[in-house]
Amino acid sequence: MTNAASFWDKIAPKYATDPIKDMESYEYTLGRTLSYLMSMDRVLEVGCGTGNTATQIAPHVGQITGTDISPAMIDIARARPTTGDVRFEAMSAEEAVKLPGPFEVVLAFNLFHLVAKFEDILADIHRQLPKGGYLISKTPCLADPVIGFKRHLIRAMIPPMKMLGKAPDVRFFTQKYFEDSLTFAGFDIVEAGNFPAMSRYIVARKQ
């Protein structure tokens, strides 16, 4: 946890000011996410970063708790203005998915490729949600052939960038493996799409 937290703490100021690379995809998936949320829902976002998405969702739900492994990211998130009930806490993904809740929805955007054992986290989220509750995620599936040459370029760049402290630990897996893992954990996939090509947006419901 310490190494990951230190990495994200270091890049937090730049991360907060960098523009979203694909705003069209971001806005589309944000809209799809909002369509599944109810005004009284209690929502957990795991890996919330600097809180941009959580603060936009907050006015539409009863309460949202954003968590991130980086205290520096959380400090920036807490300074964001919002009109809803949003709380931010610094903790690892493994800790966040053991929070007592209750939560009707768990969000995890750009998270699962950055944790060593996302399969365990899926199992904890499944236990955390009530029957019919939603896990909504967006995950770069960097081993998938659909990414083509870019997949190989990313794979080649990550080790040297990691040695220079410019990249975190990254796990490579395919869309099929990730979706199979969701099914194995006890979720039904109700919606899925690529926005953009390497990021698999999935809405999964607890059976």
Image (cartoon, helix red, strand yellow):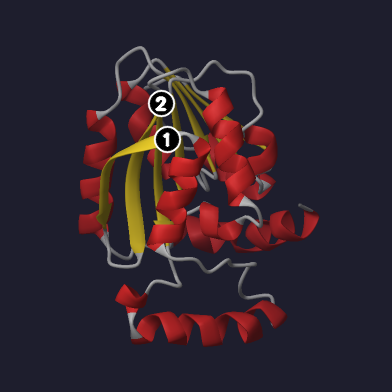
- Horizontal side of 80 relative to 6 (left or right) equals left
The picture places residue 144, in percent across and down from the top left corner, at 39, 71
Residue wearing tag 2: 207
Query: Residue sitting at 64 percent across and 19 percent down?
Result: 100
Q: Measure the alpha-carbon separation of dots 2 and 1.
A: 6 Å
Q: What amino acid is labelled 2 in the image?
A: Gln
Residue at the top extreme of this rendering: 40
- Horizontal side of 159 relative to 136 (left or right) equals right
* Nearest to N terminus: mark 2 or mark 1: 1
**Quadrant of residue 145 within the rendered picture:** bottom left
Disc sitting over residue 111 in the figure: none
Pick the residue in front: 138 or 27. 138
**Quadrant of residue 157 within the rendered picture:** bottom right
Pick the residue in front: 12 or 175. 175
Residue 85's place in the image compared with 76, above or below, is above
Pick the residue in front: 141 or 68. 141
**Quadrant of residue 114 within the rendered picture:** bottom right
The picture places residue 116, in percent across and down from the top left corner, at 66, 57
Query: Residue sitting at 51 percent across and 43 percent down?
Result: 48
> Is residue 207 visible in this depiction of the protein?
yes
Q: What amino acid is labelled 1 in the image?
A: Phe
Pick the residue in front: 129 or 68. 129
Label 1 Cα crowd, 10 Å radius (few <14 / some 14-19 / many 20+): many
Label 2 Cα crowd, 10 Å radius (few <14 / some 14-19 / many 20+): some
Disc sitting over residue 187 in the figure: 1
- Horizontal side of 204 relative to 66 (left or right) equals left
Residue 108's place in the image compared with 205, above or below, is below
The picture places residue 133, in percent across and down from the top left corner, at 40, 23
Query: Are circles 2 and 1 on residues that touch, CB within 8 Å?
Result: yes
Task: Describe the element under mark 2 as helix, strand or loop.
Answer: loop
